[in-house]
Amino acid sequence: MSQRSSVSVTRRLHRLFVTSVAVVLLITGLVVLSFELFHNRNLMIDRAHVFSELSAPHLANVLAAGASPVSTTALLDSYFSEPNLLGVYVYRTDGSEFIRAVKSELDQPLPTPSFPLRTGLKEGHQISFDLFEYSVPIRYQGELVGQIYLQYGLAAIEQQMLVYLLFGLVLYGLSLLGVSLLSKRIQRGISEPVDEILRAMEEVTVQKNYALTLPERGGKGELHELIRGFNRMLEQINKTASELKSHQEAIEQHVYFDPLTGLANRRMLIQRMEQEVMRAKRSGQIGALVYLDLDHFKTINDSLGHNVGDAVLNSVAARIRSSVRKADTPARLGGDEFVVLLPDLGKTESAATHNALSIAEKIRQGISTSHQIDGRDLHVTPSIGIALFDGEKNELENLLMQADLAMYRAKEEGRNQVRFFLEQMQEHADRRQQVEENLRQAIKDDKLFVCYQPLVKSNGRIVGAEALVRWADDNSGLINPSAFIPIAEMTDLICSVGQWVLTDVCKQMAEWERQGKKLVVSVNISPREFQQSDFVEQVQDIVLGTGVRAEYLVFELTEGILLNHIEAVKTKMQRLSQLGIRFSLDDFGTGYSSLQYLKQLPLDTLKIDQSFVQDITTDSSDATIVSTIIAMAQTLGINVVAEGVEKREELEYLEHWGCRLFQGFYFSRAVRAKRMGALIPEAGENQLREVPITSYKKHQFTN
C-alpha cells in the first residue's frame, strides 16, 4: 500500500466528516425554517378568525336589514387598521357581491377572490406565494345571511423569513468553517501515524521485513496504542517467522513428497505428468514412464522387520536418484513401488525407446547391487515396466496402468527384467479382467463343478482321487482350468474358489460314506488360500458342518507355500493334522524345496511333476531326477505319486525304481462325481486307517 493511498484515506475521512456535519446542519436549518412557516400560518389563521368574529355581528345586521352597501363602506374602511389586511369582501347567500373594500395605495390590484372558497358558505382558507385568503359564513340569529372574504398580504412575513434565512446561512457557513478547521487538525493528528502504519504494512507484506519497528514518540490515544500493539505484533511474528517457514516446508514436504524416502509422491507425480504430457504435445518430444517393483521385498520385511525394510527402501531411492537425470522425476507410490518420469527422450520412437531402456537398465543394475544394511549384505532386484507418451494419443490416466502392465509382464517372464508396454498387454489385461468378472458370477450362479481323477496302484486298483475344479460357461462351454485358475490366484478370488471346492468335495465324500463307500480325496490348496489367518478355522467348520471324516482328506500344497515363514507353515500344518488331515507336496522338483523342510514338515506324500515323468524314457536327466526323488522319499518314509502317466513304458520304469502310486490318462481321465462313485472299491486294507477327529478347541498351539 502506497503513501498516496494513505493520503486519500485521510482526505476521505475529512470529507466524510465535513459533509456529515454540513448535512446535519442543513437538515436542522430546514426543520427550524419549516417550523417557523407553520407557526406563521397558524398565526394568520388565528388573526383572521378573530377579526371575522369581531366584524361578523355588524355585517349580519346590515345584511338582515337589507340596508344599503354605502352605509357599510365607512365601517369596512376602518377595518384596514388590521395589520397586513389588503381586502374585505362581503357576499350574499346567492353568491352576489354585497360590498367590497380594498386598501388604498396598492401597487397592483388584488387577484379575484377564489370562487370555490367564497361560494362554499363555510369556513376555509388558502395560501399562495404572496397572499393569504380566508372565508367564513355570516349568520343572523342562526340563519345564514352571507359570507365574509378576507385577503392578507404576506410581504411582512416574507421579509421576516428572509432575515431568518440570511442569518441561518451566515451561521451555517461559520459552522462549516469551524468544523472544517477542526477536521483538518484532527486529520493531521491521524494521517501521520496512519501513514507510518501503512508504510510498515507495505514493507512487511511485500519485503517480508518482520524486524521493522515503528517509532512511538510517547504520545497518547488510540492510534498510539495501535502503533504499540502493531510493534508487539511484529516482534512476535519476527520471533516465529523461522518456525512458520519450517512448518510451511514440512507441510509442502508432506503434501508433495514421500515421508520415508523424500521422493515425490503420487500427487506431485500426477502434476508433473500433466505438465510433461502437455509439453510433449507442444515440443514433439517423446517421454516415458518407468514403473518398477522390488522382487520378493515382502520376504525382507517379514524376516528382518520393517525397520530393515525401510532402510532398504531408502537405499533403493538413493540409487534411483543417482541413476536418473536432473530433469527426471523419481517418485514412490507406496510399499515397494517406484515410478520415474522421463521427459525429452527424443523426437523419434526409436531414440526414445533406446534412451528410456538405457536409463531403466542403469536403475536396474544400481538396485540389483547389494545393499549394506546394519552390517548385512541384502540383495533385491526390480521388475521394470516402461510406457512411452507423446502428448497426442496417450491419456494421462492410462500411462500408469500401461507401465504397471509392462512391469507385471517383466515379473511373469522371470523378474529382474525390463519390459516395454505393448498393445497386446492391454488386450491380455482386459481379457483377464473379463475372466475374473465371469468367474465371480459363475461362483454365484453355481457354474463350477468338481471332477475326480483316480489315484491308482500299478494293478489299476483305485486307492484315492484328486479333486479338480471345472467351469462350464453358457457361452464359452467348458473352460480349461489353465485359463482361469492363474487369474484367480492373482486375486483373493482363489480363496472363494478353494472354499467352494473343499465344501463340495466334503459334501460328496459324506454322501459316498452314507452309501458305504470310503475314498481318500486330495484337494489342491493355493498359497494365498493357505496363508489366510483363519484357514484352520474355515477347514474345521467345513469338516464338522458336512460330517466328513477328515482322515480321508489330503491337502496338496505347492512348494511356493514353503518359501516364507516356515515355522508358521509348520504350525498350521500341525493344527490341521490334529483334525486328521494329511498333506501331499505337489509338483515336487519344480520349485525351491529344501530337503530340510521335507524332514521338518508333516508330509505324507510327494507328487512327482508330470514334466519329469513324460520324458523319463527318453531323457536321462529326467530319469535320474525321478529315480533320485523316489529313493529319497523311501528313505524319509514318504509315499510317492507319479503324475501324468500316459504310457506303459513310463509305468514300467516308475515301478522299476519303486514307485507304487500313479495318476494319469493311462489309467483314467478326470470324471464326474457320479462316475467316480461307481468306481470306488469296497473298503479294504489298501485304504487309510481310521483316525478320530479331534476338535480344534482342545488343542493349544504357539506360533
Image (cartoon, rainbow, N blue to C red):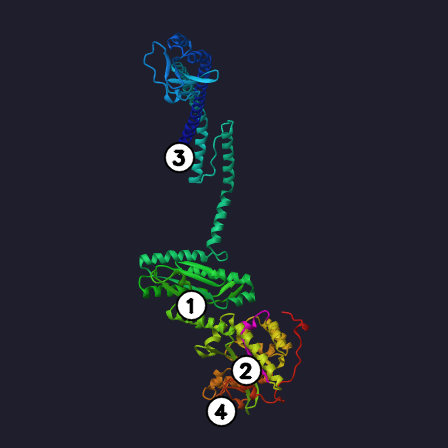
Position of residue 283 measured from the top left corner of the image (x, y, whole percent): 31, 57
Residues under labels 4 and 2: Cα distance? 21 Å
Q: Residues within 10 Å of mark 3 (few under 14, many from 20)?
A: few
- The percent coordinates of residue 620 (x first, y second) are 47, 86
For badge 3, the amino acid type reads: Ser
Q: Residues within 10 Å of mark 2 (few under 14, many from 20)?
A: many
The residue at which mark 3 appears reads as 2
- Is residue 522 in the magenta section? yes
Q: Secondary structure at mark 4?
A: helix
Image coordinates for residue 82, horizontal then vertical, percent:
42, 10
Magenta residues span 519-534
Mark 1: amino acid: Leu
In the displayed structure, 183 sits above or below 155; it is: below
Give the labeled residue for mark 4. Answer: 648
**In front of the other: label 4 or label 3?**
3
User: Who is closer to the viewer here, 78 or 250?
Assistant: 78
Mark 1 vs 4: CB contact within 8 A: no
Badge 1 element: helix
Q: Tell me how far mark 1 sits from mark 4, CA to CA.
A: 45 Å
N-terminal-most mark, 2 or 1: 1
Considering only vertical position in the picture, is 197 above or below 127? below
Q: CA distance from mark 4 to mark 3?
A: 104 Å
Q: Residues within 10 Å of mark 1 (few under 14, many from 20)?
A: many
First along the sequence among labels 4 and 2: 2
